[in-house]
Image (spheres, rainbow, N blue to C red):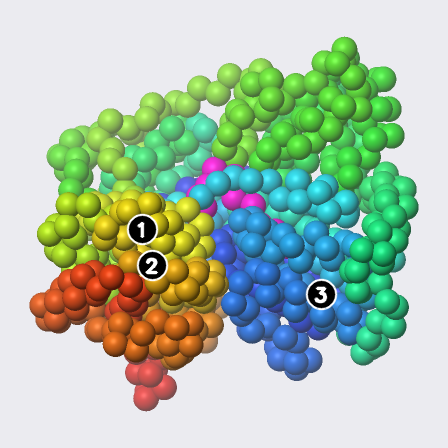
Amino acid sequence: MKKQLLLGDEAIALGALHAGLSGVYAYPGTPSTEITEFIQAHPLAKERGVHSRWCTNEKTAMEAALGMSYAGKRALVCMKHVGMNVCADAFVNSAITGVNGGLVVLAADDPSMHSSQNEQDSRFYGKFAMIPILEPSSQQEAYDMMAEAYDLSERLRLPVLMRVVTRMAHSRASVLVAEEPRNENAFSPAQEKNWVLLPAIARRQYASLIEKQKDIAEAAETSQFNQLAGEGRLGVIACGIGYNYVMEAAPANVQILKVSHYPLPEKQVKAMSKQCAEILVVEDGLPVVEQDVRGMLGADYKVTGRLTGRLPRAGELTPDNVAAAFGKAVEPTFAQAKNLAPRPPQLCPGCGHRDVYTALNKVAAGYPGARIFGDIGCYTLGALPPFQAIASCVDMGASITMAKGAADAGLRPAIAVIGDSTFTHSGMTGLLDAVNDHSPITVIISDNLTTAMTGGQDSAGTNKFEAICLGLGVEPEHVRVVVPLPKNMDEITRILREEIEYDGVSVIIPRRECIQTFKRHAKKTSDEKK
Amino acid sequence: MKVDIILCGVGGQGILSIATIIGEAAMNENLYIKQAEVHGMSQRGGDVQSNLRISSEPIASDLIPLGSADVIISMEPMEALRYLPYLSKEGWIITSSVPFVNIPNYPDMEAVKAELKQVPHVVAIDIEQLAKDNGVPRSANVILLGAAQHALGIDYEKLEAAIRRVFGRKGDAVVEANIKALALGKEAHNF
């Protein structure tokens, strides 16, 4: 074994590679992005030819990984929590088809919404699909779990969901890693007919999934990742990284059930309930386990946690709110400073999105009824001063379809702003709806040639946008390309006005490379010249 | 041995390279480390921080509890103030003295300075100027690390060795610039 300082995300990536991974499929999303990036850069992945190219969205990623599993190989799908919504169709049905090669789905949740639109808890998806869920409490466990996850997946012939949160994904610790990686699986495509989910087969497969629930529960009861320790009147169920905060803050006289492998081990919870007078549930995210425990122990048994207000209902766990749950008063020496102002993120100086919003605000000022529907990416920052340009930001692709719906209701002019990567992720189908309805909307595909907000990953549609829009049926004279620079402002505003006046679908593509990737490329070129 | 460090600043100021050097030095000493970072949207010109914990004993939480940070290392004076409730009674603030103003409502700088001075252990240095004057313009953050060395309780030589390992593949010139910056920071603190 050798020691390496690794981010949680990197420990997961290395764990998967060392477990004989043949392909990772992912769309970038904070806090999951670094898993795929680590595999892309790793020499072992290069040597073995492990697939690691970015996918167009989480659904294509999930399906491709299922295809690799079908062929007998071990595959990994990575996404941020809201990506689970995008791939849910394929994800839930993968539990019905079952797997051939091991399949691990990694969802990185973001309690406190550091970089997200909600704090949904992916463990619900695991329960929904009725498959095992793993949730590491440390970077070491994250590494060790990957091999276990693949073994479990192949033993049960089911996908395994691994759930992490931001503080696990983006925290570094030293990790002991294996010297020798395991071999990849042999190529051996599935032979059974259970992959054809016609109703008759799906019913049989669903019955088989229900049958497997005993084994799934037993695996969690005997899992090395679930441990009961200590003695006391207070029992604590500490899930995932909640365990760390409990270890930081708990008094000596408590019994602690560490849970990192679900479903919740019912026998251990019941045993604990007999020895303790009450149970406190410490879990990051939503009160998933707290509700389960209430169901297991009945209304008379005292269970506390996020639902009872012993821990905050929203936001991530911290050592401080967990200490407070144990009744410890946290009194800082120094009060909050007085001379302090919030410093929200903002679009970089020199960013092309800035010129797009400057132009849009100029033009929209001439149309009192104008609304600009935004989308997910750096350009969401157009909501903040100085631009305050957008009226909405909901989910990937919603700018185009919301503009369409608003236009259907009579809103004029309805304008959508979407980034290049978000457009190929989930905007193309909405644009087709608009074309088929001949909707009076103006779509701005602000193309900076990269997936910028997550750090500059390749964007699936680069060099293809005009062709995509024409292919979807946008009239050629209403597909316009501009270069978003202050010197072109007159031309950009003129084109915007022309297309807003057009009573149908038009697409304007302001195209200029992201200033961050531009600087990186320039530096690389100058380094190479040296 | 146990040190809890908050590194902070504005996205893009290079707090993570300071963390990398401290982490490398600690790893080499076989100490336990946990370092929670901020990635994603806030890196675009917003406030950023990293919690770095080093200990000879295993570390439970990735985050530092309120009132228990031994050192706040900040690339920006108002950002140092943001984490004041995390500072322990005898804790140190090592900060750049020059404000980074990218918001319209940045507070009065004299008031920021006055509030910083109320903390018993504060070192404020114009690291950018010092870096320029000494021909190491890209190593201002390492000057700050040099100034924090005493408060961190990590041997100077060990930080130096860590710099050699971290920057080694970028060539001798980069290594020497950072070694020089570390020394500048240590001297600045001695003033």
Q: Quadrant of residue B159?
A: bottom left
A347 up-or-down from A299: above or below: below
Q: Which residue is mark 3?
A: A66
- Image position, residue A36 (x, y; %): 57, 65
Compared to A223, does A249 lie above or below?
above
Q: In the rendered structure, which disc, 2 or 1, sits on the residue that comes first in sequence? A: 1
The mark that comes first in sequence, 1 or 3, is 3
How would you rate the neighbour count of disc 2 (Cα within 10 Å): few for under 14, some for 14-19, many for 20 or more?
A: many
Q: Is residue A120 visible?
A: yes
Location of mark 2 (residue): A439
Task: Assign a secondary structure to mark 3.
Answer: helix
Between disc 2 and disc 3, whose residue precedes?
3
The amino acid at mark 3 is Leu
Whether label 2 touches label 1, CB < 8 Å = yes
Helix, strand or loop at label 2? It is loop
Residue at 44% across, 35% down: B69
- Output the chain of dot 3: A
Q: Which residues are magenta?
A: A106-116
Give x and y (percent) for residue A130: 77, 45
Left or right of A518? Residue A259 is right
Residue under disc 2 on the same chain as residue under disc 1? yes
Q: Which mark is residue A508?
A: none
| x then y, percent, for residue B107 | 17, 35
Residue type indicated by callout 2: Ser
Subunit ID for the residue under disc 1: A
Mark seen at residue A407? 1
